[in-house]
Image: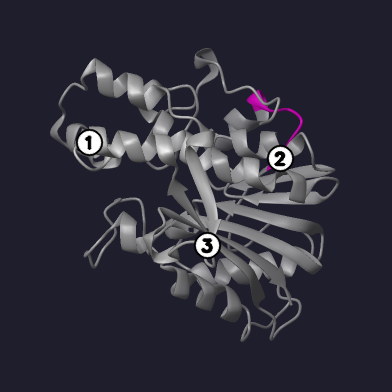
Amino acid sequence: MTDYQPTPQSDQLALTGERTVPGIAAENYWFRRHEVAYEYILDRCAGLDVLEAGSGEGYGAAMVATRAASVTCVDYDEQAVEHTRRRYPELIVHQGNLIDLPLADASVDVVVNFQVIEHLWDQSAFVAECHRVLRPGGVLLMSTPNRITFSPGRDTPLNPFHTRELNAAEMTELLAGAGSEASGPNVTGAGGGFDVQQMLGVFHGATLRALDEKWGGSIIDAQIERALAGDEWPAELTDDVAAVATADFDILSATDADIDASLDLFAVAVRR
């Protein structure tokens, strides 16, 4: 756990469906599912220069800033950027396009990109930019919903804000190959790419598995079905969702669990 405190309701970024924000009871499951990845990387970021590419509300970058030497944020959304600057003054925040990052070559040690790649049209160009701004041996930490479990049996993503979702093999291929054919003034290390050091997955722990059983097999489906139908949530469901904590999720490696059954994928990739 960290000493980070969630955003108070009085300074809350609007919930659009495209990003998650802290402090909303009915959104808490998704917030904690995202937050657990930030908790997992805190020690890895200690004393380093970190970029969060696609920083959203800013809570994750603020968590990382409690350990890192510096944290720079880049996000395309003007409202999110203004909110992050106001709420988290310890962060350096730029508005910009993720496929043209406003950072110098080899300027950071770590790039964090959580729950963003699935929103991008040109995923390879973005990963090439991550390669460019990382120092040699730098690390790209990337999470994304697992296509197999997030949009099962669908040709297009279930979430209308997603452009292309990935499974573990597709994510590995993207990271290994991106930037390998790129050249020009904004690309260093042409022929680069990343070595995927670890492919991890986010899974429900014991408490959430019990809630899955309680809510007819899936607490996720229980939330989505009621949201799509516009039904009022029963108080018990609201209470169960509001009580979810990061400790209720497990992050497991591909050697310890079936990665294709994970909820979210989490890659640790080293810049070649």
Q: Residue at x 77, y 65 (%)?
A: 138
Where residue 256 is drawn, which disc sits there? 3
The x and y percentages for residue 215 are 22, 34
Looking at the rendered structure, the kind of residue marked 3 is Asp
**Residues at discs 2 and 3 in contact (Cβ within 8 Å):** no
Task: Tell me if residue 221 is in the magenta stretch.
Answer: no
Q: Is residue 232 above or below residue 258?
A: above
Q: Nearer the viewer, residue 266 or 107?
A: 266
Q: Is residue 149 above or below residue 83?
A: below
Q: Secondary structure at mark 2?
A: helix
Where residue 222 is drawn, which disc sits there? 1
The boundaries of the magenta stretch are: 86-93
Give the residue number, with chain letter if any, for mark 2.
64
Q: Toward which corner of the image does residue 99 lie, by quadrant?
A: bottom right
Of circles 1 and 2, the one toward us is 1
Of circles 2 and 3, the one toward us is 3
In the rendered view of the protein, which quadrant contains the C terminus?
bottom right
The x and y percentages for residue 122 are 48, 68
Q: Nearer the viewer, residue 185 or 123?
A: 123
Q: Secondary structure at mark 3?
A: loop
Estimate how packed mark 2 is, as few (under 14), some (14 to 19) or many (20 or more) residues with alpha carbons within 10 Å. many
Q: Toward which corner of the image does residue 268 lie, by quadrant?
A: bottom right
Estimate how packed mark 3 is, as few (under 14), some (14 to 19) or many (20 or more) residues with alpha carbons within 10 Å. few
The x and y percentages for residue 248 are 48, 36
The x and y percentages for residue 197 are 66, 70
Residue 56 makes an appearance in the image:
no
Q: Is residue 227 above or below residue 45?
A: above
Looking at the rendered structure, the kind of residue marked 1 is Ala
C-alpha span from label 2 to label 3: 27 Å
C-alpha span from label 3 to label 1: 28 Å
**Residues at discs 3 and 1 in contact (Cβ within 8 Å):** no
Q: Residue at x 65, y 25 (%)?
A: 86
